[in-house]
Amino acid sequence: MKWFRKDRVAAIHHFLEKAGMRHVRSEEGQSLVMIALSLTVLMGFLAFATDVGVLLRQRRMAQTVADSAAIAAAFESMYEANPSTVSTSMYDAAKRDAILNGFTPGASNGVANASTGVTLNVAINPNISVSGYNSIGNVQATLSLSAFPIFMNFFAFKPLTVGATGIATNTINADGCFYVNNGGNYADPAITMGGSSVVFGKNCGVTINGNADLSGNADITAKFVAASGAITLGGSGSITGSESQNTGAPTADPLFKLQSTSNQPTVSGSSCTAPAGSGMSCVLNYKGGDLTGTTALASNTMYVFDNNATNTCGKPAVACVTLGGTLTGSNVTLYLKNNIPLDFDKNGSATLSPPGYGSSCAGSANPLCGILIDAPTDGSAGQGTYSCSHGKGNNDGNPGEMYFDFGSSTTVLNGIVYAPYMQVFVQDQGASTTLNANLVVGNLCSQAATLTVNSYSGPQSPLTKVGLVY
């Protein structure tokens, strides 16, 4: 009996031991299954996160390209005076920009590239798809492309479409009001101020392509003064406002569209024709260029003066336009062909305003909207570089000059003075010069004079910059 009990106990012990092993092995098998399932889920999440990262990266790249393309098209639109439909040149500008950023869209607006799957669509008012942005001067660029996630391809998912849109405008008022463009690099320094010369531009900035030399008690008071070259302060010369110099690359001509011959008058014999789209009459060499005495200029008229003008001034004497007496005119543009000098050395007053004065130039078909004095061409003709000297008239062979402050005169000019190859010469002899204007000139020579430049701003000014608004 004892033997039976001992044997039975051993058998039971053996049975329990085997059952326990089977239980352990069963749990190990279950753990392996759970680990395999967990790894599968984790790998799925990893793949999903990777693909989402790829899509987000593609989305960011598409946004960058859309923004850049919108800016390029807005610049071209500004050059074309904001056409009513998207022009081929506007789309081509946006397309070139997209290609530079690594995306090649279709050959025409809104058409996909069969090879790359990239589509670029450029739209303007009234076809901008984002509510509240259908305004003249706004340009929308929408880029769409096929994105190929890495892991979704394993499961035969079709390519996903990623899109982005950017809206730029060319109607933002420029911060500067005095651009010393130094066309042709004819002047060094580009600004020369001596004596007690003062330039006031408190509400805007002064941009200088080249060097500036302020001596004596000369001062520039402006929102900012930025020079691509060096600013030399001699004596008690000073700058009031933020200052930067040696900025490197010169500032681009802000009104380069006026360099186009299509935006300039044509001269034939004794007559002239204003640019297409201006709707203005044209008069050639009015009064031979002698605008002294009491003169009221006709409204909505472009007055063109060239080297055939009979009026002369300067030493040596050259054909020029002389202002004096009482000169008035509204909705007028004075065009100085080949930089014929403009001389205000007579006692008197001049009150002039340009086409579009008091209204908006955005979307205007008139390329001269806001332009009071227009001298876009390089008239140097080998006459040499500019110098800054005392005296009267077209001194020392300077290619072309404008005298806004000479003699007991009062000058109130509204609008844009665009003369990127001409010198502005100011000299104080009891005169007062107030320019409710933006100046784009070649260089400045100031001898003990006070020149106040009040920005010609708001929608009436064609001097704008391009920026993103969406």
Image (spheres, helix red, strand yellow):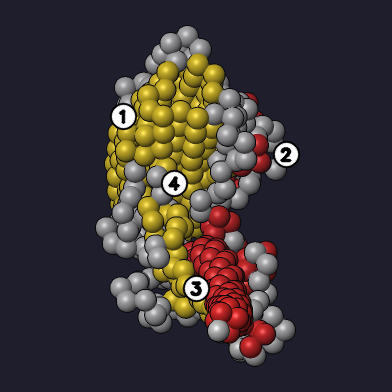
Which residue does the numbered mark 4 point to in the structure image? 417
Which residue does the numbered mark 3 point to in the structure image? 164
Q: Residues within 10 Å of mark 2 (few under 14, many from 20)?
A: few
Residue 432 is tagged as 1
Give me the C-alpha separation between circle 3 and circle 1: 54 Å
- Which mark sits nearer the N-terminus, 3 or 1? 3
Front-most of 249 and 305? Answer: 249
Front-most of 50 and 29? Answer: 29
**Residue displayed at 47% across by 78% down:** 123
| Mark 4: amino acid | Val
Q: Secondary structure at mark 3?
A: strand
- Badges 3 and 4: C-beta atoms under 8 Å apart? no
Q: Is residue 303 visible?
A: no
- Which mark sits nearer the N-terminus, 3 or 4? 3
In the image, is residue 246 above or below residue 370? Answer: above
In the image, is residue 46 above or below residue 309? Answer: below
**Residue displayed at 32% across by 33% down:** 202
Q: Residues within 10 Å of mark 3 (few under 14, many from 20)?
A: many
Task: Name the outermost residue toward the front.
Answer: 1
**Residue displayed at 67% across by 64% down:** 100
